[in-house]
Image: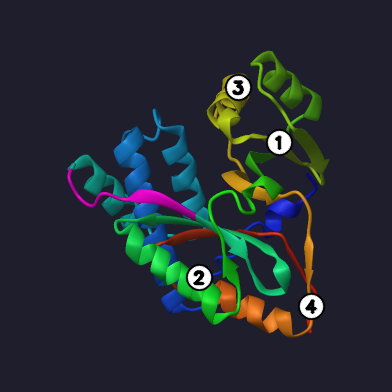
Amino acid sequence: MGRAYQNRKESMAKTSDAKARVYSKYGRVIYVCAKEGGTDPEGNLALRGLIERAKKDQVPAHVIEKAINKAKGGGGEDFSVSRYEGFGPGGCMVIVDCLTDNPNRTFGDVRQCFTKTKCKIGTEGTVSHMFDHACILALKDKDEEAVLEALLMADVDVTDIENEDGTITIFAPHTEYFKAKNALTDSFGELEFDVDEIQFLPKGNTPVSGDDVEMFERFLDMLNDLDDVQNVYHDADVTPA
């Protein structure tokens, strides 16, 4: 797997406006997760992971609390997951994950990002077969053999495990997320994960260079400016101009 997951998506908050969008996106996904799986983080591991990730990204506590309280109240917006695939600048492969209450509007907005940067949006399955849909868990200061034993004893289908500078990173199919996390917490107690996510990891890389670099950056900026977009995954290996 390597450390490709570090570049698996682009959502940097560089300005106050960008931070506000990040907070809004976290609020939306926390709300949906709490509404679907329960508002108690102790019984909803996905929600607990989201909350921990939000705190690391410096999302204010009131944003998290508001989203959970909204889920407790029932009703509210009816969001659904929409996923779009296609080819970005330089021919790189792109997956765009969205949460939306209006799929037609979201498709139009995402398609515009592709067309305005001379890219091509495709149908379901266009590029996703070139990515691994994986859960990634990373933790520090644990013995690699003990971690692997705990996972294997719980019959977790571990795809790969890395140990670099004291950080152990576990890769497994996305369907193994809850089983893997439970196996680790059962063996080691409460853990603080450096990475606790389900992501699309590219199986290879597409070089992006020259004039395509500027277009690629514009493409990502346009996508991340959309409120409905949650994550953008790609296989671009960008060479700065």
The kind of residue tagged 1 is: Ile
Q: Quadrant of the N terminus?
A: top right
Q: CA distance from mark 1 to mark 4?
A: 31 Å
Lower position in the chain sequence, tag 2 or tag 4: 4
Q: Select label 1 or label 4 by which is in front.
A: 4
Q: Is residue 200 above or below residue 7?
A: above
For mark 2, give the secondary structure. Answer: helix
Q: CA distance from mark 3 to mark 4?
A: 43 Å
Q: CA distance from mark 3 to mark 2?
A: 36 Å
What residue is rendered at 56% in x and 60% in y? 122
Residue identifier under label 4 = 209
Q: CA distance from mark 2 to mark 4?
A: 20 Å
Q: Horizontal and vertical percent for residue 21?
A: 41, 69
Lower position in the chain sequence, tag 1 or tag 4: 1
Number of on-image labels: 4
Range covered by the magenta-colored residues:
75-83
Lower position in the chain sequence, tag 3 or tag 1: 1
Residue identifier under label 3 = 183
Residue identifier under label 2 = 223
For mark 1, give the secondary structure. Answer: strand
Q: Quadrant of the C terminus?
A: bottom right
Q: CA distance from mark 3 to mark 1?
A: 12 Å
Q: Horizontal and vertical percent for residue 35?
A: 29, 40
Colouring mode (rainbow / by chain / secondary structure / one colour): rainbow
Residue identifier under label 1 = 170
Lower position in the chain sequence, tag 3 or tag 4: 3
